[in-house]
Image (cartoon, grey):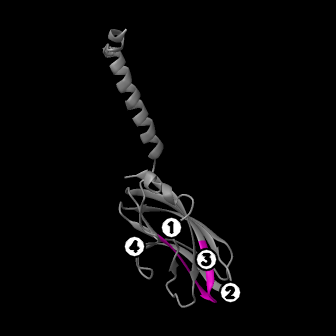
């Protein structure tokens, strides 16, 4: 009886076990990878004195999945693009209170007043705003979503989406 338990596995069994582990690893890899994309939600207080606007936080339901899609959070208010290519950027939100000349924008880099603007939307008053744009971004580009306005202090909220359409 003990001799039977001490038998070595056959070569076919070893191949089957290796194939099983390889297949399992491949499935888990595929489940955590995909084209670089993310959606983030941010809400921030924007005082009248913030002439250049306020960076909204990169937070929300999908923030924990950024690394699974290749994005890197560089701070609580910015994200880094991992792959060079054409991206669809979407931005939607609003500012409440007595805000006038409300605007939301996506800005490259960490400087609120300078840097290329890839998407800017705004209206006189404080209605809901939404817009999209397709832009070419280099790997490592840092993006932030900015809210600004005139008039009284206000709370602004926005949802930012970035999706890779085609890699270089």
Q: Which mark is residue 128?
A: none
Mark 4 or mark 3: whose residue is earlier in sequence: 4
Residue found 37% across the figure and 31% down from its top: 22
Q: Residues within 10 Å of mark 1 (few under 14, many from 20)?
A: many
Element marked by disc 4: loop
Q: Secondary structure at mark 1?
A: loop
The residue indicated by pointer 4 is: 109
> What percent of the width, then of the height, locates residue 102?
61, 81
- Magenta-tinted stretch: 144-157
Mark toward the start of the polypeptide (2 vs 4): 2
Where is residue 106? Give x, y as percent: 49, 71
Residue shown at 34% from the left, 20% from the top: 15
Residue 56 seen in the current view? yes
Residue at the disc numbered 3: 156
How far is the residue under mark 4 from the one under mark 3?
21 Å
Quadrant assignment for the N terminus: top left
C-alpha distance separating marks 2 and 1 = 25 Å
Of discs 1 and 4, which sits in the foreground? 1
Dot placed on the residue nearer the N-terminal end, 2 or 3: 2
Could you say whether the residue bearing mark 3 is in a helix, strand or loop? strand
Estimate the spatial distance between the alpha carbons at disc 1 and disc 4, rounded to whole Å.
14 Å
Give the answer, above or below, for where 30 lies relative to 13.
Answer: below
Q: Crowding at label 2, few (<14), some or many (≥20) Cα neighbours within 10 Å?
A: some
**Whole-percent x, y for residue 142 in the image:** 40, 67
Q: How many marks?
A: 4
Which residue carries the number 1 mark? 58
Along the polypeptide, which appears first: circle 1 or circle 4? Answer: 1
For disc 2, the marked residue is: 98
Q: Nearer the viewer, mark 2 or mark 1?
A: 1
Depth order, front residue of 132/154: 154
């Amino acid at each position: 009886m003990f001799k039977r338990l001490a038998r070595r596995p056959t070569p076919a069994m070893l191949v089957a076990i290796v194939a099983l582990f390889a297949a399992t690893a491949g499935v888990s890899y595929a489940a955590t990878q995909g084209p670089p994309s993310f959606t983030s939600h941010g809400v921030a207080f924007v005082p009248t004195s913030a002439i250049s606007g306020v960076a909204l936080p990169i937070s929300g339901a999908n923030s924990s999945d950024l690394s699974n899609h290749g994005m890197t959070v560089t701070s609580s208010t910015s994200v880094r693009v991992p792959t060079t290519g054409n991206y669809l950027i979407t931005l939607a939100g609003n500012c409440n209170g007595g805000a006038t000349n409300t605007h939301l924008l996506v800005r490259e880099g960490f400087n609120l007043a300078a840097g290329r603007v890839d998407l800017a939307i705004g209206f006189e008053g404080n209605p809901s705003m939404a817009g999209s744009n397709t832009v070419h971004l280099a790997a490592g580009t840092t993006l932030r979503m900015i809210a600004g306005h005139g008039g009284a202090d206000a709370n602004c909220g926005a949802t930012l989406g970035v999706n890779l359409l085609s890699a270089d």
